[in-house]
Image (cartoon, rainbow, N blue to C red):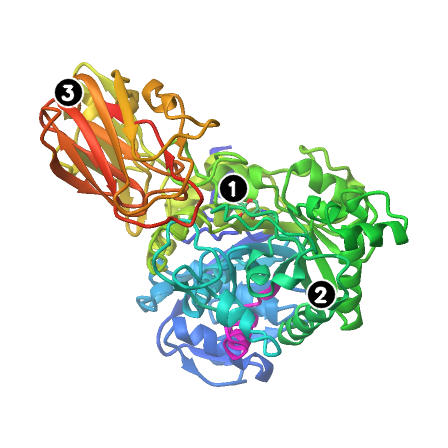
Amino acid sequence: MRLVLLCLLMLLPFGSLDAQIIPTPRSDTPAPGRFVLDDTTVLSYADELAPLAGYLLQYLPLTSGRNVSPTRRCIALSLDDTLPAEGYRLTIREERIELAGGTGGGAFYAVQSLLQLLPAEVYAGRCPLPVELDCRTIADAPAYAYRGMHLDVARTWMEGERLKRMIDLLAYHKINKLHLHLADDEGWRIEILSHPELAAIGGFRGGDSPVAPVYGKWGEKYGGYYTQAEMREIIRYAARRNIEIIPEIDLPGHSRTVARIHPEILCRYTPDTTPTGGYDTRSAWCVAREENYALLEDILDEICRLFPSELIHIGGDEVDRSQWERCPDCRALMRERRMGSTARLQDYFTNRLAEMLVRRGKRPAVWNETVADGTFTRDCAVYGWESVKACRQAAAQGYPTVVMPGQYFYFDMRQSAEEEGHNWAAIFDAGKPYGFDLSKQGFTPAEQSHVLGFEGAFWSELYVSHEPETTDYIDFMLFPRICSLAELCWHSGPKEWPAFKKRLYDSHFDRLNAMKVGYRLFPPAVSYADGRLTVQAPADEEVFCVEEPSGEEFRCTGPVYTTSPERYRFRTRRGTGRSPWVAVPAYYRTITPAVRFSSSFSGSTRAPFERLEQYRGAAWTTRTCRRGDWMLFTFEQPVRCREIHLQTGFFHLPKAILNSGTVEISYDGETFLPAGELTAGACRLHPDRPVRAIRVTSGCDGNGDPRVIIQPLRIKP
Ligand code: TNX
């Protein structure tokens, strides 16, 4: 019996030193023997796979020769049309490695799986040779034809090179669709030759641009756009990696950028154009204005010719239809066409765009609101984002549906309570998209048959305030959540989160290190007992600690002995990965000493200044800021504390902030000493004596918002 078990164990795939492929292949059958890969190994390939051979040679220094005789010790790339589209077979024998794909995409995925069987350094172009590879046959194909990732390049500009880097990272995970959100309220990112002003003006905001500055970049004019030539190159780059780019121009809502450049597209009443500093849902195209369709046709015509994808996304989310109610022309159109509600106006608008696309051999893709009432009957793909229910309803109506409810697939959501990111949909880490299950979510088999696949989304309004030139924030938000997404899209077998997580640690994180991805490690657990702070890292990663008030970061090799555990926070690091900061509950505890607030601003009636004195939510001013505006917090009694966190604007969302200003501290209530500057509207003070008062003075004229938001002080004892 023992012997049988032993034999069985030896037969198990992934038993030896070999890597574990993510996403999991359909089948992986080991065979005896090994192939020795060294720099004399020849790469042989069918002519049509020359670009793929070129791709592989970027990672592995092999000897290249096309169609060399099959007797040589080689890696052979070929096509085999008996295999499923995007499917492949990877056979490792002692004498050769064969990679056969059902299509070019399948062959590309065979190469991806081969890369994952090699040491992780292969992703840095530094695979140590020779390498021994266990013999095996992998037969693989994706569960879903649509495996997507969405990037919002409208809110935060991402230049071409960064997009290409992201395309590479997606391709490594066998993601095959990149949904590019090219136009929104805060930016227009694609050149339109017949209307060059759209990108030339709309690609930049702040400074003297008519496009409202938002989210943490006010004074400076900032942005960019893709020229058509550049986009063509990016499309080609993606196609070589089996990724199709699906462009989106968000219509008829989310159109503030166009509306700033062409105000005539709005309805014929005096539109309310007060800046909101955030979501502006009041900038929908007028449905009744005939010239609008000419402009839209020009735009869509160029989009259709530039992007080879059949699907062209025309948005349709979050439309404020109340503008149409107030528009005499829209009302006349409704009467003329006997429309019972403004929802029908949106149908009318979307149908006209759909016709433009269909005439050009394309198919519209829309956000779920577009079909919520079931009257948009065109052959379109529906992207379900609002809820699982919205996805199920679209599928139930027979629409080809991309499932991406924010609660599981919005990677702009923060991953635990104290981290950065949105929380409106949910707070979740990589476990959540991994565990998404259509059946458990109530999709009937018929509904499931309409699911094209899944898509992760990265909305970027919170990214603006980070340094866009670094990848820290986006990588941390996307990885390993994209690894989970890839697994969900590709592998239909049983799912077991702890095992998947272990595979991340055992092999995949090393690959992310070699790819230089600043991914998120799962947070360590911290506990405090008997004067000892103990940190338990999930996989014995290195633990780092910051001690307050010194603020120094040091490596922790054992427990921290202390009587004030609230002064310590911890994070782990491994390669290019890092965990979020974690600490015991005492670290987050705040006190609320009696305080008086006065200011050169007046408080709004909706969110009055008393809130600040009661530590009960944010207060709003009645106007935006001017240089020299001041705010003063005066404590009734001197307050001894280790930190005072002063913040303007929303927590997690740097808008309606004082975007520059100085902070002063007073220990006697009379003399004020410089204590810091505001960054992203906030400042943390670490007073060494009891504090009487804090004064903030605005260094900026205007903040892109009609008000300033002030948060209650967060005081840590
Ligand atoms: C909702 S998703 C939006 C976006 C925001 C996102 C933030 C969708 C179609 N609309 O405009 O960026 O939430 O999570």
Q: Could you tell me which quadrant the C terminus lies in?
A: top left
* Mark 2 vs mark 1: in front: 2
Seen from the viewer's position, the closer of residues 533 and 35 is 533
Residue displayed at 72% across by 46% down: 326
Residue displayed at 18% across by 26% down: 693
**Residue 137 image position (x, y, % from top left):** 55, 59
Q: Which residue is mark 3?
A: 640
Q: Are marks 2 and 3 in contact (CB under 8 Å)?
A: no
* Magenta span contains residue 264: no
Residue displayed at 48% across by 53% down: 21
Bounds of the magenta segment: 226-248
Q: Amino acid under label 1? A: Leu
Which comes before the other along the chain, label 2 or label 1? 1
Q: Secondary structure at mark 1?
A: helix
Q: Which residue is mark 1?
A: 8
Q: Which residue is mark 2?
A: 292
Q: Report the side of 688 relative to 201 (left or right).
A: left
Q: Amino acid under label 2? A: Asn
* Magenta span contains residue 228: yes
Residue behind label 2 places its C-beta within 8 angstroms of ligand 1: no
The Cα atoms of the two marked residues, 3 and 1, are separated by 66 Å
* Circle 1 residues within 10 Å: few <14, some 14–19, many ≥20: few
* Mark 3 vs mark 1: in front: 3
The Cα atoms of the two marked residues, 2 and 3, are separated by 62 Å
